[in-house]
Amino acid sequence: MASDTARRADGIGAELDELRAQVLAVREAGDPDTEQALAGAWRLRLHELLRDNPSIAAGLRQLLDEHLTPALPANEQAGVRSVVMRVEARDNSRVYMAGGDQHIARS
């Protein structure tokens, strides 16, 4: 009998396989908006996996660096990057963090 963790991993794997198939289908159909939405679903799911299982981060990074990134076309490889941010706020301080552009407007 498979453990709960193994069943969960199989379910997640199946979900990610389905998302991948959908991304490839809409890419072939030339639908960049849907492709971006599905890619966002991938990012969200991976974020949840890492949040729930931080110990898999090193293995995932190795998979990305050694297998997935090299499989991308050269022009897409440049877009693969890591952003690591750490912050500590105390008392009444505020922290604004972004992995890209950030626009703050006073109201």
Image (cartoon, rainbow, N blue to C red):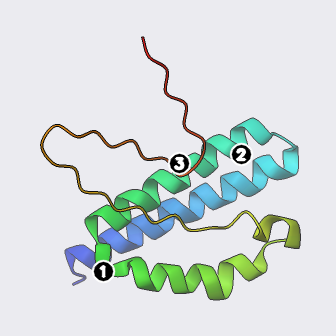
Residue marked by disc 3: 41
Q: Amino acid at mark 3?
A: Ala
As helix, strand or loop, the secondary structure at mark 3 comes to helix
Q: CA distance from mark 1 to mark 3?
A: 22 Å
* Label 1, label 2: how far apart the Cα atoms are: 29 Å
Disc 2 residue type (three-letter): Glu
- Left or right side of 41 for 59: left
Which residue lies most toward the left here? 91
| Secondary structure state at the residue bearing disc 2 | helix
Looking at the image, is 28 positioned above or below residue 12? above
Q: Residue furthest top?
A: 107
Can you tell which quarter of the image residue 34 is in? top right
Q: Residues within 10 Å of mark 2 (few under 14, many from 20)?
A: many
Left or right side of 102 for 87: left
- x and y percent of residue 89 in the render? 22, 50
Left or right relative to 62: residue 11: left
Quadrant of the image occupied by residue 91: top left
Q: Which quadrant: the N terminus?
A: bottom left
The residue singled out by tag 2 in the image is 35
Which amino acid lies under the numbered mark 1 shown in the image of this protein? Ser
Q: Residue at x 40, y 77 (%)?
A: 57
Mark 1 or mark 2, whichever is nearer to me: 1
Mark linked to residue 55: 1
The residue positioned 52% from the left and 64% from the top of the image is 83
Left or right of 46 on screen, residue 71: right
